Image: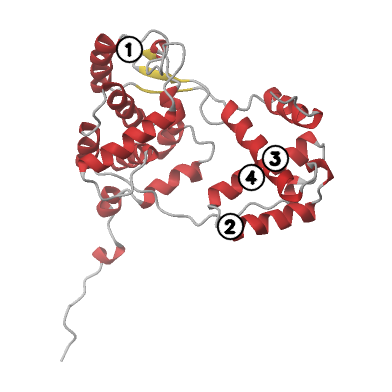
C-alpha cells in the first residue's frame, strides 16, 4: 500500500476530528484526488481559477448536480479547513440543483413493492426503511439492541450529520422484526452482511430494491429513498404535524421537510379553494 502524502494525511485527520463518516471521507479524498489529477499538480498548488476551470470541465462531462455539489463540498473543505483559507470556501459556488418533486408511492404500491422482495433479510430491511423513514445507511447500521420494544422506538445512530435520533417503532413492524429475528437470529447488527460482525452493505439493499420494482411491475422510478419520501408524505396526509415529521426524518431545516406538502395529494385535495366560497352562474346572462 502506497504511503499517504502529508497533505492527504492532514485532510484525513481534519475529517476524522470532525467525526465525518468513512463514506464522506472517501468521497472527499476521491474528489480532491480527481481535481489534482486533472491538472497534474498537487492540489495545494492550485488556485481558485483552477477550481473554476475544473467546475466548467465537470459540467461539460454531464456530471449530475448532486455529483458536482459533492465535489464542491470536498474542495470547500480542503481549501477552508485543511489549507486554512477560512474565506475561500464562500468563493467556490455550489451548483443550483433543479428542484424536482420527490416520487411517492401510494399505500397499495408500497405493499406491492415490499411483497415483491424475495429475500427475508432484504424484505425486513426495506420494510423497516418505509415504516421508520430511514435512509439506506441508517437501515444498514441498525443493531439488534436499537429496537426498543419497551419504549416503542428505534434508535438511529449516526444519522446524517453524525446525529442520533429516535423514530417510532410500529407495532406491526415489531411483529415482522420478531418473526425475522426468530428465523435469522442476528446477533449484533439487525441486518448483518457476510458475517455478524459487519452490517449489510447498502448496495445489497439497492439491488433488492431494483429487483422488487421490476417484480412488482411498478412504472415509477423507485429507489430505496422513495420509501423515505413515501413515509413522510403519508404521515403528512394522515395529519401529522410537519415539525414532528422534521424530527423523525432528522432534517436540520424545516424547508427540507416542507417539500412534502407539494406531493401530499390527500392534503392538497382536502384543502378548500377560495373559489368554493363564491356563488357564480356558469352561463353568462343572455
- Rendered location of residue 92, percent (x, y): 72, 51
Q: CA distance from mark 4 to mark 3?
A: 10 Å
The answer to whether 169 is drawn above or below residue 255 in the figure is above
Foreground tag (2 vs 1): 2
- Rendered location of residue 36, percent (x, y): 74, 44
Q: Which residue is mark 3?
A: 33
Callout 2 environment at 10 Å: few (<14), some (14 to 19), or many (20+)?
few
Q: CA distance from mark 1 to mark 3?
A: 46 Å
What is the number of the mark on residue 149? Answer: 1
Q: Which residue is mark 2?
A: 61
Q: Residue 8: tell me if it is visible.
A: yes
- First in sequence: mark 2 vs mark 1: 2
Element on which disc 1 rests = loop
The residue shown at (30%, 63%) is 274
Foreground tag (4 vs 3): 3
Foreground tag (1 vs 4): 4
- First in sequence: mark 1 vs mark 4: 4
The answer to whether 4 is drawn above or below residue 95 in the figure is above
Q: CA distance from mark 4 to mark 2?
A: 14 Å
Foreground tag (1 vs 3): 3
Q: Which residue is mark 4?
A: 71
Q: CA distance from mark 1 to mark 4?
A: 41 Å
Quarter of the image for residue 178 reads: top left
Element on which disc 4 rests = helix
Position of the N terminus by quadrant: top right
The residue shown at (80%, 41%) is 42
Element on which disc 2 rests = loop
Amino acid at each position: 500500500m502506497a504511503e499517504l502524502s502529508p497533505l492527504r494525511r492532514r485532510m484525513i485527520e481534519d475529517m476524522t476530528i470532525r467525526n465525518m463518516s468513512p463514506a464522506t471521507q472517501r468521497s472527499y479524498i476521491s474528489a480532491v484526488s480527481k481535481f489534482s489529477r486533472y491538472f497534474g499538480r498537487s492540489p495545494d498548488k492550485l488556485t481558485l481559477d483552477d477550481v473554476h476551470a475544473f467546475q466548467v470541465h465537470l459540467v461539460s462531462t454531464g456530471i449530475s448536480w448532486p455529483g458536482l455539489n459533492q465535489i464542491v463540498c470536498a474542495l470547500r473543505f480542503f481549501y477552508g479547513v485543511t489549507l486554512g483559507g477560512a474565506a475561500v470556501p464562500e468563493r467556490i459556488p455550489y451548483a443550483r440543483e433543479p428542484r424536482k418533486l420527490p416520487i411517492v408511492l401510494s399505500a397499495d404500491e408500497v405493499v406491492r413493492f415490499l411483497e415483491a422482495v424475495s429475500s427475508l433479510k432484504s424484505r425486513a430491511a426495506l420494510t423497516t426503511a418505509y415504516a421508520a423513514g430511514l435512509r439506506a445507511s441508517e437501515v444498514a447500521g441498525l443493531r439488534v439492541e436499537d429496537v426498543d420494544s419497551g419504549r416503542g422506538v428505534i434508535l438511529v445512530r449516526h444519522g446524517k450529520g453524525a446525529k442520533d435520533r429516535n423514530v417510532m417503532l410500529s407495532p406491526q413492524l415489531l411483529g415482522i422484526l420478531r418473526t425475522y429475528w426468530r428465523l435469522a437470529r442476528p446477533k449484533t447488527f439487525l441486518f448483518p452482511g457476510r458475517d455478524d460482525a459487519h452490517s449489510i452493505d447498502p448496495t445489497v439493499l439497492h439491488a433488492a430494491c431494483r429487483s422488487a420494482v421490476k417484480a412488482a411491475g411498478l412504472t415509477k422510478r423507485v429507489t430505496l429513498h422513495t420509501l423515505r419520501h413515501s413515509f413522510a408524505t403519508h404521515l403528512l396526509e394522515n395529519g401529522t404535524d410537519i415539525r414532528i415529521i422534521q424530527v423523525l426524518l432528522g432534517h436540520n431545516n424545516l424547508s427540507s421537510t416542507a417539500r412534502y406538502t407539494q406531493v401530499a395529494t390527500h392534503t392538497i385535495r382536502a384543502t378548500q379553494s377560495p373559489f368554493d366560497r363564491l356563488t357564480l352562474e356558469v352561463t353568462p346572462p343572455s
